Image (cartoon, grey):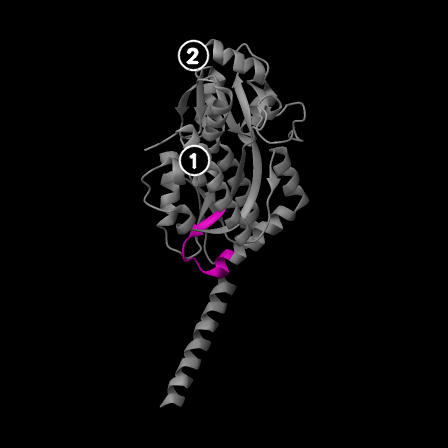
């Protein structure tokens, strides 16, 4: 009897291994949905569409970007958390995922627990941009203007809890500037109102602001990274005026908890190959992006570290969202 049980167990184990290998070899055999939790035209959308095209070519299956904005990034994230863990639904992971863990007191998911890290894509600085009609030309002049007009300056963001929002909150905390926060459902509509002069300042992800800076429709005062951005070397850092100030945005791919390891590994490998392509690196550099290739575990460490970092900023600033 024991020999029979052992034989059956061995046969079942071999069958499962065979099925697993067959599944891995066949993945993907249909289109993959890539959820971007913001409207079109913002940095997350721009990056996703650039990478999705390259990933589609490598996989031989279409990677379809689907925008699901709202809830400060949480609507799109929750959609992916609840999606089947079959490798065919991905999330464009971004700083808001780490920030929201502390900013929102009631979420229907735990991001670190419920999303499987797949691959890092790129890290970018934010850029402090102002409406062209504001009579300031530097970060120092902006701080002076804010303090002389404590109830008049409106700070736009791409949504509560985004890196755009928290970069502004960090600036407020470190400078003593008073600015009313005006959240939008993405960088696109926030930029539209900034260009029109409806709001005064935005700490935007660099890629979505670059075209408007170059056209002169908005004015860049400083990048939020520690060092100057090589693609725009004439723009100083905010930290040149506000010592110690630093905030960057990071982007990658996540999938629902429980997704097969074979799917994670395949997407990770292809993303790393895409990021190694000189033409892709050049394209990302034009947008101010620094590729962050690595293993799924590497990206998981980034998520945990950024969640812990921004928890301190959220707590110190007193920012909350419902």
Seen at 53% across and 58% down, the residue is: 265
Residue 246 appearing in the image: yes
Q: Is residue 255 magenta?
A: yes
* Residue 143 spot, x, y in % from top left: 53, 15
The residue singled out by tag 1 in the image is: 38
Residue 141 is drawn in which quadrant?
Answer: top right
Seen at 59% across and 31% down, the residue is: 225
Seen at 43% across and 12% down, the residue is: 152
> Could you say whether the residue bearing mark 1 is in a helix, strand or loop?
loop
Q: Identify whether 205 is placed above or below 134.
A: below
* Residue 186 spot, x, y in % from top left: 43, 30
* Residue 114 spot, x, y in % from top left: 39, 51
Seen at 59% across and 14% down, the residue is: 137
Task: Rate crowding at label 2 as few (under 14), some (14 to 19) or many (20 or more) other CA atoms within 10 Å.
Answer: some
Q: Which residues are magenta?
A: 253-264
The residue singled out by tag 2 in the image is: 152
Q: Is residue 115 magenta?
A: no
Task: Rate crowding at label 1 as few (under 14), some (14 to 19) or many (20 or more) other CA atoms within 10 Å.
Answer: many
Number of numbered callouts drawn: 2
| Label 2, label 1: how far apart the Cα atoms are | 28 Å
Q: Identify whether 251 is placed above or below 216.
A: below
């Amino acid at each position: 009897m024991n020999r029979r049980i052992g034989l059956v167990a061995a046969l079942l184990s071999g069958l499962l291994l065979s099925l697993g290998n067959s599944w891995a070899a066949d993945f993907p055999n249909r289109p993959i949905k890539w959820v971007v939790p913001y409207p079109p035209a913002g940095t997350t959308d721009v990056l996703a569409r650039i990478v999705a095209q390259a990933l589609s070519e490598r996989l031989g299956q279409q990677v379809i970007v689907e925008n699901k904005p709202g809830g400060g990034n949480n609507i799109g994230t929750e959609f992916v958390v609840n999606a089947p863990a079959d490798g065919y639904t991905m999330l464009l992971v971004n700083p808001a995922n780490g920030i929201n863990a502390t900013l929102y007191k009631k979420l229907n998911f735990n991001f670190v627990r419920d999303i499987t890290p797949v691959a890092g894509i790129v890290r970018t600085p934010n850029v402090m941009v102002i409406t062209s009609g504001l009579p300031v030309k530097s970060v120092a002049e902006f701080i002076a203007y804010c303090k002389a007009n404590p109830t008049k300056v409106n700070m736009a963001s791409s949504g509560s809890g985004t890196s755009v929002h928290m970069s502004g909150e960090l600036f407020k905390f470190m400078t003593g500037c008073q600015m009313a926060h005006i959240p939008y459902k993405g960088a696109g509509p926030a930029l539209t109102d900034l260009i029109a002069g409806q709001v005064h300042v935005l700490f935007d992800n660099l890629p979505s602001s670059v075209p408007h800076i170059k056209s002169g429709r908005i004015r860049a005062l400083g990048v939020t990274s520690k060092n100057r951005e090589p693609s725009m070397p004439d723009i100083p850092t905010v930290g040149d005026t506000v010592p110690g100030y630093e905030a960057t945005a990071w982007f990658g791919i996540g999938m629902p908890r429980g997704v097969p390891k074979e799917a994670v590994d395949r997407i990770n490998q292809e993303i790393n190959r895409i990021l190694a392509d000189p033409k892709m690196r050049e394209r990302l550099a034009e947008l101010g992006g620094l590729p962050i290739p690595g293993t799924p575990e590497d990206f998981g460490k980034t998520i945990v570290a950024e969640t812990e970092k921004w928890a301190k900023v959220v707590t110190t600033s007193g920012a909350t969202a419902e």
